[in-house]
Image (cartoon, rainbow, N blue to C red):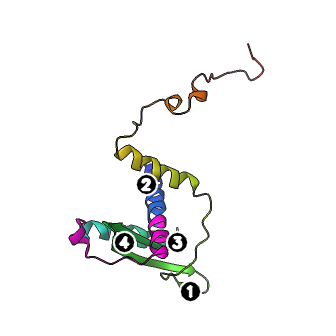
Amino acid sequence: MKFATHYSTLLVAASLTLANIATAASPLPEARPSSVGLSPDRLERISARIQGDVDSKAIAGASAMIIRNGKIAYSENFGHADREAKDPITDDTIYRIYSMSKPITSVALMSLYEEGLFFLDDPVSKYIPELGNLQVVSDPTDRG
């Protein structure tokens, strides 16, 4: 269960990172969460979770943003860009982002899944035929 929680947090972080990148490209209008169909109480769960990770020193800081219907409905900064120097996270903080291809790909795939363009139990070979005849060999020296 802990893995699932951290994995979902990672996916949310990737989504939020993409939202921040999109916002930097062109300013978007802001909206009250309820005006775009979001619950302010449920958004507070995001704030509490991220702030808890900052307080427990699991992370130094984070930015979170949710854009819905082309409007910024939630935008918060937490913690420090540099823990030792106590530099706060700001809207223009530059992050080093490593190994983000998997979470970004996962978010893209789940968006396609939500649109019904594939199913989670589809065999990979349906989309990449070359992977259709893979075999597991218990003895790597046994090629027969």
Tag 4 near tag 2, CB within 8 Å: no
Asked if residue 65 shows in the view, the reply is yes
Task: Give residue 47's mark.
Answer: 4
Spot occupied by residue 116 in the image (x, y as percentages of width and height): 35, 41
Spot occupied by residue 53 in the image (x, y as percentages of width and height): 46, 69
Q: Please state which of residues 133 and 24 is positioned toward the viewer in this rendering.
A: 24
Q: What residue type is labelled 3?
A: Lys
Q: How many marks?
A: 4
Q: Which of marks 4 and 1 is nearer the N terminus?
A: 4
Q: Is mark 1 on a helix, strand or loop?
A: loop
Q: Residue tagged by mark 1?
A: 86
Marks 4 and 2, Cα distance to the nearest angstrom? 15 Å
Marks 1 and 3, Cα distance to the nearest angstrom? 13 Å
Marks 2 and 3, Cα distance to the nearest angstrom? 19 Å
Q: Which residue is drawn at 40% across and 71% down?
A: 65
Considering only vertical position in the picture, is 12 above or below 25? above
Magenta stretch encompasses residue 20? yes
